């Protein structure tokens, strides 16, 4: 499910080997290997410049006016713990992960008023802040428009100082009646107030320049993942699987929720994750029924059920994995009953998922309806009522540069889309919440679970936990 709050150590040699294999397979570029002047604030591998250029070209072919986008400034958060990460749409089109940048993309065809590319013939321009050696002593090296070879490193034929953005927009205003950009809107996952701040700046800098929203067109592109994006997502899922396995092995009464979360985050970081995909959710007992619980303060008690929704981010791409465990290693009969209903609902949705299926709640191809109907026809609550009322969230969402990635949830599934399958039942009166969540990629004929190596079967989970408990007991005897 992932939180809305903000994406096993394999050893150094294996981590390096993975990166080499990724680079060989898809031409993935690691900032650290290109040269010191391209170091980004956040350690992150990226796709080749040609991939980002192709995305911009595809977008340019769909519009009749220039597209203007701004990256983050690095001042959106004032926390000392904040590490810069680029605005998602900007990063998706540029691969640029540093502050204070902007881009102008001219339409591929002439507009209704006869305009085409920029007055200098450029089809796109990347704007970067000037070199600031004093600031770099504190924050490290940054790319600047005057760096030798900056065009080749960024993949833009024209890289100009950010101070040239206003003159460029003023020229655009004399040729085009409007521009495309990401217009502000206030929703839970929106870029607000960043987007509104940019529009206010535009009103002052180039008064009267009309705007149309490009958000949906970018979102539609982002729903189909490239080979490089799939590799990043697979790696994020692998790290998440490893962390959940470690949690299964260490889970026991007496630990605190935050201790389980800490171990899982450690596994992510030791495996190369640059950040969490979202705030870890570890909810024991009554906390298992809170969907985005993140206080993590409860001491885990014997008999508790524990929901663990924890996912790694890798190179900007977020996994989203949930498992539900018995605190003492053995499901009670009621816990197992509810768990097996949730698992049955998930399996039913997995079996039905294929190109053409939909993630939204309505429609004849709705995977949600399949999972809901399964839950609502299996089992009862303590009052004898069907359990559908306790499945209180959607079944799925896309993942990518955001754990709740952009795009129309009712758009039929297509090969290359990556989404979650996460049915759940939450019964507060019984302090009993169960969610099972896996990540899947759509293939030509069905789907493939990226997280398939992580056990879902309750017998397998109990076996892993029992073996770990036995090893702990043997180790304790050896210490005595």
Image (cartoon, helix red, strand yellow):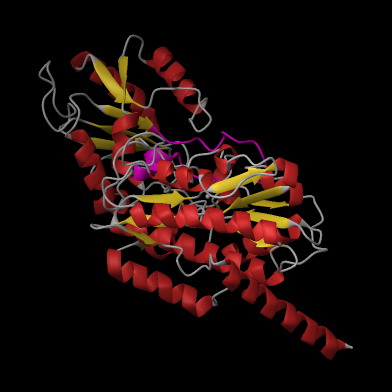
The part of the chain drawn in magenta is: 70-92
- Indicate the quadrant where residue 226 lies: bottom left
When the figure is inspected, residue 343 is found, relative to residue 20, above or below; the finding is above
When the figure is inspected, residue 30 is found, relative to residue 72, above or below; the finding is below
The x and y percentages for residue 69 are: 36, 31
Residue in front for this viewpoint, 59 or 67: 59
Q: Residue furthest bottom?
A: 478
What's the residue at 64%, 60% (across, down)?
336
- Indicate the quadrant where residue 134 lies: top right
- The answer to whether one can see residue 295 in this image is no
The x and y percentages for residue 85 are: 50, 45
Residue in front for this viewpoint, 170 or 382: 382
Q: Residue furthest right?
A: 480
The x and y percentages for residue 469 are: 74, 77
Q: Quadrant of the C terminus?
A: bottom right
- Please state if 8 lies on the left or on the right of 415 as rendered: right
When the figure is inspected, residue 195 is found, relative to residue 404, above or below; the finding is above
What's the residue at 48%, 73% (across, down)?
15
Q: Residue furthest top?
A: 208
When the figure is inspected, residue 249 is found, relative to residue 325, above or below; the finding is below
Was residue 27 drawn as part of the magenta stretch in this picture?
no
Residue in front for this viewpoint, 23 or 476: 476
Was residue 80 drawn as part of the magenta stretch in this picture?
yes
- Please state if 379 lies on the left or on the right of 197 as rendered: right
Q: How many badges with numbers are in the image?
A: 0
The x and y percentages for residue 146 are: 35, 44
What's the residue at 48%, 77% (across, down)?
14
Name the dominant secondary structure of the magenta segment: loop
- The answer to whether one can see residue 480 in this image is yes
């Amino acid at each position: 499910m992932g939180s809305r709050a903000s994406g096993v150590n394999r050893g150094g040699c294996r981590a390096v080997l993975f990166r080499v294999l990724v680079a060989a397979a898809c031409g993935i570029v690691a900032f650290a290997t290109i040269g010191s002047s391209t170091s980004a604030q956040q350690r992150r591998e990226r796709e080749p410049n040609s991939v980002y250029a192709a995305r911009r070209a595809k977008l340019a072919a769909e519009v009749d006016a220039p597209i203007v986008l701004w990256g983050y400034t690095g001042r959106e958060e004032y926390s000392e713990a904040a590490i810069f990460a680029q605005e998602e749409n900007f990063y998706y089109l540029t691969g640029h992960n540093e502050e204070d940048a902007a881009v102008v993309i001219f339409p591929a065809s002439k507009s209704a008023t006869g305009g085409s590319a920029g007055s200098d013939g450029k089809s796109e321009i990347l704007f970067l802040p000037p070199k600031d050696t004093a600031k770099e002593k504190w924050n490290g090296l940054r790319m600047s428009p005057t760096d030798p070879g900056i065009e080749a490193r960024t993949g833009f034929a024209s890289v100009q100082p950010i101070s040239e953005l206003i003159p460029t927009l003023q020229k655009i205003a004399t040729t085009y009646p409007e521009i495309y950009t990401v217009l502000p809107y206030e929703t839970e996952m929106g870029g607000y107030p960043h987007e509104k701040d940019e529009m206010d700046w535009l009103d002052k800098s180039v008064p009267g320049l009309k705007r149309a929203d490009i958000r949906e067109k970018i979102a539609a592109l982002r729903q189909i993942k490239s080979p490089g994006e799939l590799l990043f997502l697979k790696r994020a899922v692998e790290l998440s699987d490893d962390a959940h396995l470690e949690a299964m092995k260490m889970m026991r009464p007496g630990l605190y929720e935050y201790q389980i979360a800490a171990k899982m985050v450690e596994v992510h970081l030791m495996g190369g994750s640059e950040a969490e995909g979202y705030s870890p959710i570890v909810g024991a007992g009554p906390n298992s029924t809170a969907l985005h619980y993140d206080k993590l303060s409860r001491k885990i008690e014997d008999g508790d059920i524990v929901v663990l929704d924890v996912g790694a981010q890798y190179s900007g791409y977020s996994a989203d994995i949930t498992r539900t465990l018995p605190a003492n290693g053995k499901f009670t009969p009621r816990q197992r009953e509810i768990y097996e209903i949730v698992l049955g609902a998930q399996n039913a949705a997995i079996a039905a998922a294929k190109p053409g299926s939909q993630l939204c709640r309505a429609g004849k191809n709705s995977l949600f309806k399949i999972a809901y109907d399964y839950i609502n026809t299996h089992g009862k609550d303590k009052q004898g009522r069907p359990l559908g009322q306790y499945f209180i969230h959607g079944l799925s969402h896309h993942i990518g540069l955001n754990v709740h990635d952009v795009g129309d949830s009712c758009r039929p599934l297509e090969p290359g889309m990556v989404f979650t399958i996460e049915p759940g039942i939450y019964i507060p009166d019984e302090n009993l919440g169960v969610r099972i969540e896996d990540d899947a990629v759509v293939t030509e004929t069905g789907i493939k679970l990226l997280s398939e190596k992580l056990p879902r079967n309750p017998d397998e989970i109990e076996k892993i936990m029992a073996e770990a408990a036995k090893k702990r007991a043997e180790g304790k005897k050896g210490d005595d």
